[in-house]
Image: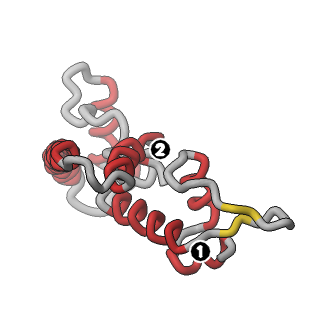
């Protein structure tokens, strides 16, 4: 099948498939005389595996490790178990960070009880004050928590 057919079958954008090829998660497909990529069922299965791992928020490095074991079915899977245990630990840490962030946002929300003019908005005033304070209660998260729209961590991309 051509890349467009694979993309449709896997519900995956063409550019994502090309990205996985560049990252060597998907093997280079055969090409036609016209230089079109031709994919087979193994590509589709491997892409499905990668997409499932991504849905579990695994990094590309974690997926590479899992693919090495998938490609060597006779190997001991103890390292697979360790990888998943480590990933569970990362998820638990992020949940804790998100709970802290939620508390901070709720405390910030309490700074403004209703509709005010922007110049009297307690939230905006608190953000201005907190930005200058050395003991900033809201500055513990310099960037967005992973998974937000503004986070562009290369390790967890696409």
Q: Relative to 102, say whether 52 is above or below.
A: below
Q: What separation in Å lies between label 1 and label 2 (alpha carbons)?
A: 26 Å
Q: Which of label 1 and label 2 is nearer to you? A: 1
**Helix, strand or loop for disc 1:** helix
Locate residue 35: give its quadrant. Answer: bottom right
Q: Which of the marked residues, 1 or 2, is nearer the chain's N terminus?
A: 1
Q: Is residue 19 left or right of residue 112?
A: right
Residue at horizontal 27 percent and vertical 47 percent from the top: 122
Residue at horizontal 20 percent and vertical 47 percent from the top: 76
Which mark is on residue 31? none
Residue where numbered disc 2 is placed: 152
Q: What colour scheme governs how the chains and residues are painted in the rendered image of this protein?
A: secondary structure
Q: Position of residue 6 (x, y in %)?
A: 59, 74
Q: Position of residue 87 (x, y in %)?
A: 21, 46
Crowd tier of the residue under label 1, counting other residues whose Cα lies within 10 Å: few below 14, some 14–19, many 20 or above = many
Residue at horizontal 37 percent and vertical 38 percent from the top: 143
The quarter of the picture where the N terminus appears is bottom right
Locate residue 56: give its quadrant. Answer: bottom left
Q: Residue furthest right?
A: 34
Residue where numbered disc 1 is placed: 6
Q: Is residue 73 left or right of residue 34?
A: left
Question: Which residue is nearer to you in this view: 116 or 75?
Answer: 75
Asked if residue 45 can be seen in this view, the reply is yes
Q: Position of residue 65 (x, y in %)?
A: 34, 44
Residue at horizontal 25 percent and vertical 48 percent from the top: 75
**Helix, strand or loop for disc 2:** loop
Q: Relative to 11, say whether 123 is above or below.
A: above
Residues at circles 1 and 2 in contact by the CB criterion of under 8 Å: no
């Amino acid at each position: 099948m051509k890349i467009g057919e694979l993309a449709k079958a896997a519900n995956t954008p063409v550019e994502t498939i090309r990205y996985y090829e560049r990252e060597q998660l998907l093997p280079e497909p055969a090409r036609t005389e016209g230089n079109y990529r031709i994919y087979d069922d193994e590509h589709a299965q491997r892409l499905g595996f990668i997409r499932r791992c991504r849905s579990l928020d695994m990094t590309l490095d974690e997926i590479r490790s899992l693919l090495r074991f998938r490609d060597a079915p006779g190997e001991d899977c103890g390292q697979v178990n360790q990888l998943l245990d480590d990933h569970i630990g990362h998820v638990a840490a992020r949940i804790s960070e998100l709970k802290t962030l939620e508390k901070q946002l709720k405390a910030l929300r309490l700074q403004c009880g209703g509709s005010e003019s922007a110049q009297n908005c307690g939230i905006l005033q608190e953000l201005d004050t907190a930005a200058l304070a050395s003991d900033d209660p809201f500055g513990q998260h310099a960037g967005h928590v992973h998974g937000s729209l503004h986070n562009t961590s290369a390790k967890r991309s696409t």
